[in-house]
């Protein structure tokens, strides 16, 4: 079995994904979307993303990618290279890349699926989702939500799949 590599990210219209090693918003529905999309799947993340989460997430195998030989991530596997991380994940239907920006940039060319939460706002930040060619992707599902008492901005959940070149 060949594992499909998928990226999951919440990003603002200006592609911001973080500020001060945190999400720049609190969207309870996005947290539920993340949980539902990632449950039971291996999660691949960079060290700073691991530090922002700070604990293993239940029901998911967490693999932290770091070149730092002293990197410790209790309850997680630690890999020194992407190849090693993919080997640790093993032959599963889907491996989820959950950030951060440099790991997204490294894995986007290999990804076959994107799970995105698009926050309909331009927000300040210091970490951005990489530039990507939207023409290479097909939107297969989208669900839009208005702002409400729990969500300061409107947002959209999307699932995109890489278009195959015949």
Image: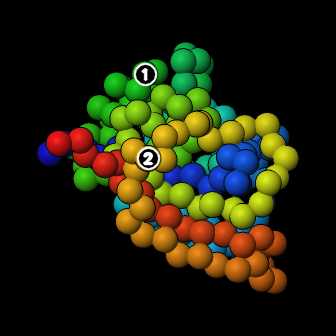
Q: What label sits on residue 81 in the rendered view? A: 1
Give percent across and percent down for residue 163. Answer: 31, 49
At x 76%, y 78%, the residue is 147
* Relative to 61, 34 lies left or right: right
At x 43%, y 22%, the residue is 81
Q: Which residue is mark 2?
A: 135
State which tag comes first along the sequence, 1 or 2: 1
At x 39%, y 44%, the residue is 136
Q: Residue furthest left?
A: 1
Give percent across and percent down for residue 15. Answer: 68, 46
Q: Tell me the crowding category of disc 1: few under 14, some 14 to 19, or many 20 or more residues within 10 angstroms, Cα based.
A: few
Residues under numbered marks 1 and 2 in contact, where contact means CB atoms less than 8 Å apart: no
* Relative to 142, 113 lies left or right: left
Location of residue 4 with respect to 157 vertically, above or below: above
Secondary element at tag 1: loop
Give percent across and percent down for residue 118. Answer: 63, 60
* Relative to 102, 6 lies left or right: left
Location of residue 97 with respect to 118 vertically, above or below: above
Question: Quadrant where the C terminus lies?
Answer: top left
Q: In this view of the protein, can residue 76 be seen by the observer?
A: no
Q: Tell me the crowding category of disc 2: few under 14, some 14 to 19, or many 20 or more residues within 10 angstroms, Cα based.
A: few
At x 63%, y 74%, the residue is 29
Give percent across and percent down for residue 114. Answer: 44, 52
Location of residue 101 with respect to 39 vertically, above or below: above
| Residue toward you, 31 or 140 | 140
């Amino acid at each position: 079995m060949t594992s499909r590599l998928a990226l999951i990210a919440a990003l603002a219209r200006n592609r911001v994904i973080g500020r001060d090693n945190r999400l720049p918003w609190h969207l309870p529905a996005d947290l539920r979307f993340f949980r539902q999309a990632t449950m039971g799947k291996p999660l691949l993340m960079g060290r700073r993303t691991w530090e922002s989460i700070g604990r293993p997430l239940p029901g998911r195998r967490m693999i932290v990618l770091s070149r730092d030989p002293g990197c410790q991530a209790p309850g997680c596997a630690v890999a020194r290279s992407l190849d090693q991380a993919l080997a640790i994940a093993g032959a599963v239907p889907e491996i989820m890349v959950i950030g951060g920006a440099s790991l997204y940039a490294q894995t986007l060319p290999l990804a076959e699926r994107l799970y995105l939460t698009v926050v309909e706002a331009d927000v300040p930040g210091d970490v951005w989702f990489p530039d990507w060619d939207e023409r290479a992707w097909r939107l297969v599902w989208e669900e839009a939500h208005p702002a409400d008492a729990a969500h300061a901005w409107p947002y959209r959940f999307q699932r995109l799949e890489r278009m195959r070149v015949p």
